[in-house]
Image (cartoon, rainbow, N blue to C red):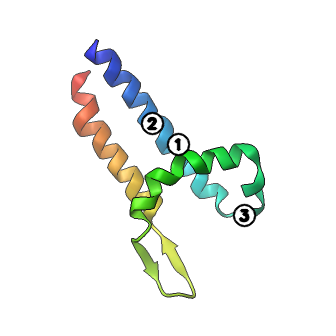
Amino acid sequence: MISLVAQVIDKVITILIFAIVIRTFLSFVPQLKSNQWISLLYDVTDPLLKPFQRFQIGGAAMTVDLSPLFAIIVLNLIQSWIVRPFF
């Protein structure tokens, strides 16, 4: 039973990682933000990215948002340290 729960959590984390990657690429096309599916993607990934958005490089003119990178690293760490040992 624990193995089944671990597998489900593993798949959810993998889907969240893919959602963050897709959102990152879609952020270069701001016109798509009004789409219903893109809005849902932003609603799902925003809670994961908000804690990391204070880590930005650059000044006021041009900043680089590293929150997707940090969120993916944390999700991978959770996946490898907490979930995968139960397989």
Image position, residue 58 (x, y; %)? 47, 83
Q: Does the residue at mark 3 contact the one at mark 1 (Cβ under 8 Å)?
A: no
Q: Nearer the viewer, mark 3 or mark 1?
A: 3
What residue is shown with label 3?
A: 30
Q: Amino acid at mark 1?
A: Phe
Quadrant location of the N terminus in the rendered image: top left
Residue shown at the point (45%, 60%) measured from the top left: 50
Q: Measured along the vertical axis of the image, is residue 42 above or below residue 82? A: below
Sort mark 3 into few (<14), some (14-19) or many (20+) by Cα contacts within 10 Å.
few
Q: Could you give the CA–CA distance between mark 3 and mark 1, rounded to whole angstroms?
A: 19 Å
* Count of residue discs: 3
Q: Measured along the vertical axis of the image, is residue 4 above or below residue 30? A: above
Mark seen at residue 14 = 2
What residue is shown with label 1?
A: 18
Q: Image check: 55 left or right of 77? A: right
Residue shown at the point (24%, 35%) measured from the top left: 82
Q: Could you give the CA–CA distance between mark 3 and mark 2, rounded to whole angstroms?
A: 25 Å
Q: Could you give the CA–CA distance between mark 2 and mark 1, rounded to whole angstroms?
A: 6 Å
**Disc 2 element:** helix
